[in-house]
Image (tube, rainbow, N blue to C red):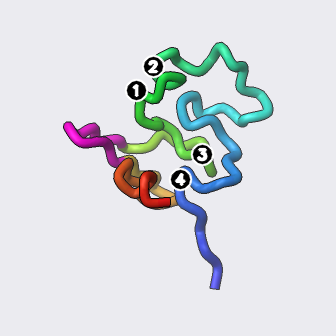
Amino acid sequence: MITVPGPLEQPLRYGVHTGQPLEMQAPEAIPAAAKLGLEPPRFCGQCGRRMVVQVRPDGWAARCSRHGTVDSADLGRR
């Protein structure tokens, strides 16, 4: 059985705030709000596709069409 890694599971191949391959991503390309942890991920870390993101008062949820869904509440449980 093949398991598909989630959008934010390690190792990431793409920047979650830029969608660029990590080896090509410049540090200044990451927005300041993202560096402070105030911005949810907008791109899948596995394939670089744009994710559908819903921001809620208590966090956020993001969905990649290929790699599934991740919720900010789930990240605290790991």
Classed neighbour count for the residue bearing mark 3: other residues with Cα under 10 Å, few (<14), some (14–19), many (≥20)? many
Determine contact: label 1, label 3, CB under 8 Å.
Answer: no
Of mark 3 and mark 2, the one earlier in the sequence is 2
Question: How many numbered circles does the render carry?
Answer: 4
Q: Amino acid at mark 1?
A: Leu
Of mark 3 and mark 4, the one earlier in the sequence is 4
List x then y, in percent, for residue 24: 77, 28
| Residue bearing mark 3 | 45
Q: Residue at x 35, y 41 (%)?
A: 53
Q: Amino acid at mark 3?
A: Gly
Determine contact: label 4, label 2, CB under 8 Å.
Answer: no
Determine contact: label 3, label 4, CB under 8 Å.
Answer: yes
Q: Is residue 40 left or right of residue 27?
A: left
**What's the distance in space between the residues labelled 1 and 4, CA to CA?**
18 Å
Say which mark, if any, is on residue 7: 4
| Residue bearing mark 1 | 38
Q: Residue at x 59, y 68 (%)?
A: 4
Please tell me in which quadrant of the rendered image residue 74 appears: bottom left
Determine contact: label 2, label 1, CB under 8 Å.
Answer: yes
Q: Quadrant of the N terminus?
A: bottom right
What's drawn in magenta, residue-wise?
53-61
Residue 22 sits inside the magenta stretch: no
**Tag 3, which secondary structure?**
loop
List x then y, in percent, for residue 42: 46, 36
List x then y, in percent, for residue 45: 60, 45
**Tag 1, which secondary structure?**
loop
**What's the distance in space between the residues labelled 3 and 4, CA to CA?**
5 Å
Say which mark, if any, is on residue 33: 2
Q: Select label 4 or label 2 by which is in front.
A: 2
**What's the distance in space between the residues labelled 4 and 2, CA to CA?**
20 Å
Looking at the image, residue 2 lies above or below residue 41 = below
Q: Is residue 41 left or right of residue 72?
A: right
